Image (cartoon, grey):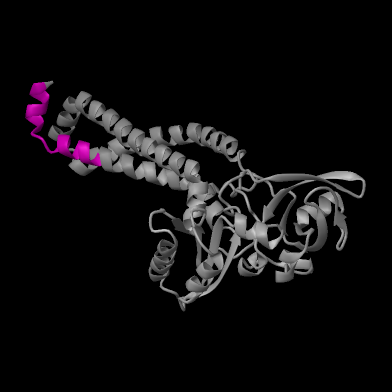
């Protein structure tokens, strides 16, 4: 589960998520042009762009159903500022990027992903009909705009008129230069936003935090199961060893009287528990494999099931067992054997 969570947060999403800060600017009062200029005054800011959504923050985006060459096509639609694709480092594989003049035309222009092109047979410079339809000006590589729970669906970025963009630009994406002091940049962004509305609490986050929130459920599950696994391992083994060593106190005393060493007694007990551990491992491994495989079915993109994860689990539980058995039986074996025999 940890590896799956790590896989989701470190995999290539199809855009550049490094040195990126996302600001929810829905509460901004005033000109976003002024905001744009003031943000760029900071030397560490490379560029700023806008959209009406937070990328990779949800699995549910607005969908359009539009006629295309006599057929109805359905795709997720993400309205953006004309500079969005360039700032986010998304690759255009055919056609062109958005231009500033695209915001001033009456009809929308679309850039579809590769999945949409393949599924619907879309072609460059053709028209998506209907309300909010427009010309297809380009195609881009597939990006993971939703979580890894979902397969990459047909989607399109589009630029609408200037009035729409500045009325619905809910999120600002601030791209920083490499090596920029991230905390200082964050402080500059917060202070700039406060100038526009000091009474509004703007939500400003590093993009890594956006991804963490997207997989918050998985992180909670990892924490829960980790705590349970450690608790069961320690308490279960410790309880069993304490009970066994107490029941065999007289046997340990007799062995000590007959000349057995403390080390020999500890090795004897560890061998017995190692056999139990191996039986448990053989039983638990297929059950664990089945449970994790079913859990991974929730994700369209998943990490491989590595064999060494099970070996690591065996080593970890084995270490807990050896430490517990050694400590408990060392304590019993070092007691006065005559006292142990009398007590029994």
* Image quadrant where residue 318 sits: top left
Residue 235 visible in the shown view: yes
State the residue at coordinates (59%, 35%): 294
Front position in the image: 73 or 16: 73
Vertical order, 247 against 123 (above or below): above
Can you name the residue that lies furthest to the front here? 30
Residue at the image position 77 percent from the left and 64 percent from the top: 105
Q: Which residues are magenta?
A: 326-343
Residue at image point 56% right, 55% down: 170
Q: Is residue 313 magenta?
A: no
Spot occupied by residue 110 in the image (x, y as percentages of width and height): 77, 59
Majority SS type along the magenta span: helix
Question: Which residue appears farthest toward the bottom when viewing the image?
Answer: 43
x then y, percent, for residue 198: 38, 58
Q: Nearer the viewer, residue 246 or 23?
A: 23
Say whether residue 327 is magenta: yes
Relative height, residue 181 to residue 293 (above, below): below
Where is residue 182, by image quadrant? bottom left
> In the rendered view, does 29 fall on the left or right side of 273?
right
Q: Is residue 259 left or right of residue 119?
A: left
């Amino acid at each position: 589960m940890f590896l799956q969570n790590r896989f989701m947060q470190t995999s290539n999403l199809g855009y550049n998520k490094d040195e990126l800060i996302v600001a929810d600017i829905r509460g901004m009062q005033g000109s976003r042009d002024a905001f744009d200029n003031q943000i760029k005054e900071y030397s560490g800011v490379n560029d700023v762009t806008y959209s009406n959504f937070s990328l990779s923050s949800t699995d549910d985006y607005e969908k359009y159903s539009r006629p295309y060459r006599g057929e109805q096509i359905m795709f997720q639609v993400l309205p953006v500022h004309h500079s969005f694709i360039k700032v986010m480092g998304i690759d255009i594989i055919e056609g062109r990027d958005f231009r500033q003049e695209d915001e001033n035309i009456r009809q929308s222009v679309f850039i579809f992903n590769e999945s949409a092109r393949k599924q619907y047979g879309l072609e460059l410079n053709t028209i998506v009909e209907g309300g909010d339809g427009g010309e297809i000006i380009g195609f881009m590589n597939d990006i993971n705009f939703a979580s890894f729970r979902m397969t990459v669906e047909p989607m399109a970025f589009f630029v609408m008129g200037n009035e729409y963009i500045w009325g619905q630009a809910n999120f600002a994406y601030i791209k920083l230069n490499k090596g920029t002091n991230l905390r200082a940049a964050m402080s500059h962004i917060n202070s700039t936003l406060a100038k526009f509305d000091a009474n509004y609490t703007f939500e400003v986050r590093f993009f890594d935090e956006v991804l963490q929130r997207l997989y918050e459920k998985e992180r909670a599950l990892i924490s829960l199961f980790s705590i349970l696994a450690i608790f069961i391992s320690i308490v279960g083994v410790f309880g069993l060893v304490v009970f066994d060593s107490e029941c065999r106190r007289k046997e340990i005393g007799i062995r000590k009287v007959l000349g057995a060493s403390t080390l020999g007694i500890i090795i004897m007990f560890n061998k017995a528990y190692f056999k139990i551990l191996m039986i448990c491992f053989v039983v638990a491994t297929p059950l664990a494999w089945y449970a994790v495989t079913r859990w991974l079915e929730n994700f369209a993109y998943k990490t491989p099931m590595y064999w060494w994860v099970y070996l690591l689990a065996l080593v970890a539980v084995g270490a807990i067992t050896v430490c517990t058995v050694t400590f408990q039986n060392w304590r019993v074996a070092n007691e006065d054997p005559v006292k142990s025999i009398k007590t029994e």
